[in-house]
Image: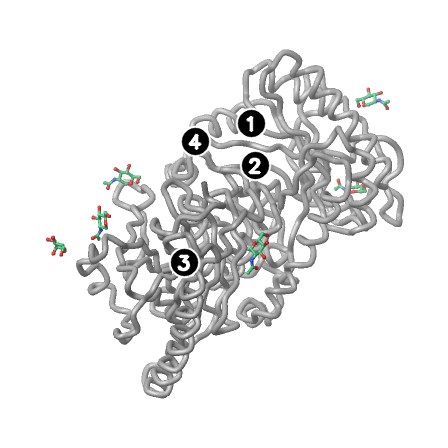
């Protein structure tokens, strides 16, 4: 078929499909919810962003067990200083990513002293003290613990980023402004120790939430730029002769346009990664958290800061790239039974999709473990639903990001990347609606590609019956692989997630279970059940952007 007839055909087909979907909708309404049709449009001309191969990252924090929010203490023994590194689930969970990026840091990082030879004071952990900033005294990282952490990360195959104390040497005024230059001597001693021991660090990050208005304390952009210069010199010097030097990363804080513009302008050749933090759902005790997550307009509010930061980087001479260095959704440790339940995957996966479409290279989830927002449970280490969402993303979504839009329902969030390991593309579809099943067709921009018109017949009434999903689908030799995630028992606040009809649980040796797809024929639409997430890997859609 030449292009014009193909277009006409597409037009009539879409028209007809709409009629059918209205019919099907009206037939089904009132029985088991609505069924509607929609189309995901993927522009395959060029990719709009390119993430790191290892886009998924998770954080480990310093908070001691005494850290409490709204009367609840959710950190247990999840601090870098006391986490049980011998726990087999922890090891298996990290290993499954091979590799997982891990960012060590958080509020207390600018309160940490690194043990050095000949210290006058003993190396002691944080203690609760309400008259100190953030409610804790300074704490010390013993080098014996630093050894344990590095040995563990090496064994688990993690790529680690360490957040350095950037308040060292400054005095913080009553108004929160930090005065003076960064005293790098303690950080330098840690870096030298690390190199002498042969530990590999992927990046050194300077400071936590000290940019802009700051959380607790703030450092002016020009001073911060000078401090990044010091860190850069230290790294260049200590890693002299190393083929791969660690990245220099900063400022690890909340986006404020004016501060970031100045900072980026003043660090053109120094800085490799600009990190921003995201807590766009509000405080952890907000009783509207689930409503916000289910509200497409609320989620759309997340676009702005990605767009702004991308444009600052594009319009400056910097070669720095953007990362989300820490994102936990709801601040002050998240909310139990929300931040650690199935519903949070709607927010989390949507953020991953959104961030990558603005060329964000890495996205660090607060936390791997600790608080209410851990990918792993703070006390049992058992993975929460978001852990599996992250792992599926990591395995399926390649680094080339495709421009994607959806028509048919505003409750569907749609993202597409080139596939990670094989040909074709992977779609991520999120259905925020409680009742409506959406049958999704895929349309690609490129008329020359196979996927230009991926016809899917409407003859089947959608069934969410996974037993029937792997029927012989080698018809046309055209199949796709699907991963359907739903909440256990339909309870959005369940801590268990169901993949293709089966609850995901650790296997008998505490290993991460296999996550097998179901095969579907390209003749069938992608069926996105109410309150579900679908990853669909479509090998037959071959796009120029994915070459
Ligand atoms: C697809 O992307 C290309 C490159 O950005 C653009 O020129 C083209 O207009 C896009 N097509 C549509 C329909 O948006
Ligand atoms: C708590 O911090 C304040 C201010 O730094 C200090 O004066 C006080 O001695 C500390 N209290 C304890 C018990 O360490
Ligand atoms: C930086 O800190 C070290 C260790 O506390 C101290 O010996 C040194 O004098 C400080 N340097 C400056 C310039 O203040
Ligand atoms: C699937 O269909 C193909 C082609 O019709 C056929 O050769 C094959 O035996 C079928 N496989 C199964 C498992 O039914
Ligand atoms: C459990 O899962 C791990 C990781 O997938 C695997 O290596 C191991 O063989 C599995 N053990 C059992 C008993 O299935
Ligand atoms: C899906 O198809 C692949 C090959 O395309 C095959 O290896 C796999 O066994 C199939 N899975 C199911 C559940 O039929």
* Spot occupied by residue 86 in the image (x, y as percentages of width and height): 42, 33
Q: Is mark 4 within 8 Å of ligand 5?
A: no
Which residue matches tag 2?
80
Which residue matches tag 4?
156
Residue at mark 3 to residue at mark 1: CA–CA distance: 56 Å
Element carrying mark 4: helix
Vertically, is 156 above or below 441? above
Residue found at the far top of this picture = 241
Quarter holding the N terminus?
bottom left
The residue under the point 47% across, 45% down is: 544
Vertically, is 354 above or below 237? below
Observer able to see residue 379: no
Residue at mark 3 to residue at mark 2: CA–CA distance: 50 Å
Are the residues at dot 2 and dot 4 in contact (C-beta closer than 8 Å)?
A: no
The residue under the point 73% across, 45% down is: 209
Observer able to see residue 103: yes
Q: Residues within 10 Å of mark 1 (few under 14, many from 20)?
A: few
Q: Earlier in the sequence, mark 2 or mark 4?
A: 2
Q: Earlier in the sequence, mark 1 or mark 4?
A: 1
Q: Position of 68 compared to 157: left or right?
A: right
Q: Residues within 10 Å of mark 2 (few under 14, many from 20)?
A: many
Circle nearer the viewer, 3 or 4: 3
Circle nearer the viewer, 1 or 4: 4
Are the residues at dot 3 and dot 2 in contact (C-beta closer than 8 Å)?
A: no
Which residue matches tag 1?
145
Quarter holding the C terminus?
top left
Residue at mark 1 to residue at mark 4: CA–CA distance: 16 Å
Q: Earlier in the sequence, mark 3 or mark 2?
A: 2
* Spot occupied by residue 130 in the image (x, y as percentages of width and height): 74, 49
Which residue matches tag 3?
452
Residue at mark 2 to residue at mark 1: CA–CA distance: 9 Å
Q: Earlier in the sequence, mark 3 or mark 4?
A: 4
């Amino acid at each position: 078929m030449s292009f014009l007839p193909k277009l006409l055909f597409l037009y009539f087909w879409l028209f007809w499909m709409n009629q059918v979907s209205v019919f099907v909708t009206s037939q089904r309404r009132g029985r088991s919810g609505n069924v509607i049709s929609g189309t995901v449009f993927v522009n395959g001309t060029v990719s709009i962003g390119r993430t790191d191969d290892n886009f998924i990252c998770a954080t480990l924090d310093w908070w001691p067990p005494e850290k409490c929010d709204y009367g609840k203490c959710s950190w247990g023994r999840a601090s870098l200083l006391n986490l049980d590194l011998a726990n087999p689930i922890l090891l298996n969970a990290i290993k499954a990513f091979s590799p997982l990026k891990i960012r060590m840091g958080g509020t207390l990082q600018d309160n940490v002293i690194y043990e050095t030879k000949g210290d006058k004071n003993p190396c002691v952990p944080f203690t609760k003290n309400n008259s100190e900033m953030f409610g804790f005294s300074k704490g010390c990282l013993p080098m014996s613990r630093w050894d344990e952490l590095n040995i563990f990360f090496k064994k688990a195959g993690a790529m680690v980023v360490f957040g350095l104390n950037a308040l060292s040497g400054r005095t913080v005024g009553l108004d929160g402004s930090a005065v003076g230059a960064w005293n790098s001597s303690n950080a330098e001693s840690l870096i030298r120790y690390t190199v002498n021991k042969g530990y590999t660090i992927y990046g050194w990050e300077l400071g936590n939430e000290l940019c802009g208005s700051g959380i607790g304390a703030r450092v002016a952009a020009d001073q911060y730029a000078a401090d990044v210069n010091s860190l850069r010199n230290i790294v260049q010097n200590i890693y002299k002769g190393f083929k791969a030097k660690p990245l220099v990363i900063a400022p690890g804080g909340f986006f404020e346009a004016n501060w970031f513009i100045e900072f980026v302008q003043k660090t053109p050749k120094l800085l490799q990664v600009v990190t921003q933090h995201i807590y766009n759902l509000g405080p952890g005790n907000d009783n509207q958290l689930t409503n916000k997550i289910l509200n497409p307009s609320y989620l759309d509010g997340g676009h702005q800061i990605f767009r702004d930061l991308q444009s600052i980087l594009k319009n400056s001479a910097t070669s720095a790239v953007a990362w989300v260095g820490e994102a936990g959704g709801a601040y002050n440790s998240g909310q139990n039974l929300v931040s650690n339940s199935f519903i949070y995957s709607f927010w989390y996966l949507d953020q991953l999709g959104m961030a990558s479409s603005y060329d964000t290279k890495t996205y660090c989830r607060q936390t791997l473990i600790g608080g209410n927002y851990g990918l792993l449970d703070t006390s049992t280490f058992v993975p929460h639903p978001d852990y599996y969402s992250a792992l599926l993303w990591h395995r399926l979504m390649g680094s080339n990001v495709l421009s994607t839009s959806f028509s048919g329902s505003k409750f569907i969030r749609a993202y597409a990347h080139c596939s990670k390991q094989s040909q074709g593309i992977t779609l991520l579809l999120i259905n925020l609606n409680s009742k409506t099943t959406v049958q999704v067709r895929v349309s690609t921009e490129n008329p020359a590609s196979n996927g230009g018109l991926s016809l899917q017949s409407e003859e089947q009434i959608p069934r969410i019956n996974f037993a029937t999903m792997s029927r012989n689908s080698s018809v046309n030799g055209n199949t796709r692989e699907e991963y359907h995630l739903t909440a256990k028992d339909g309870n959005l606040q369940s801590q268990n997630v169901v993949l293709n009809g089966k609850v995901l649980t650790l296997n008998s040796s505490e290993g991460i279970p296999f996550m097998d797809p179901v095969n579907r024929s390209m003749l069938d639409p992608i069926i996105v059940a109410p309150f579900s997430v679908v990853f669909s890997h479509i090998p037959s859609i071959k796009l120029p952007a994915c070459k």
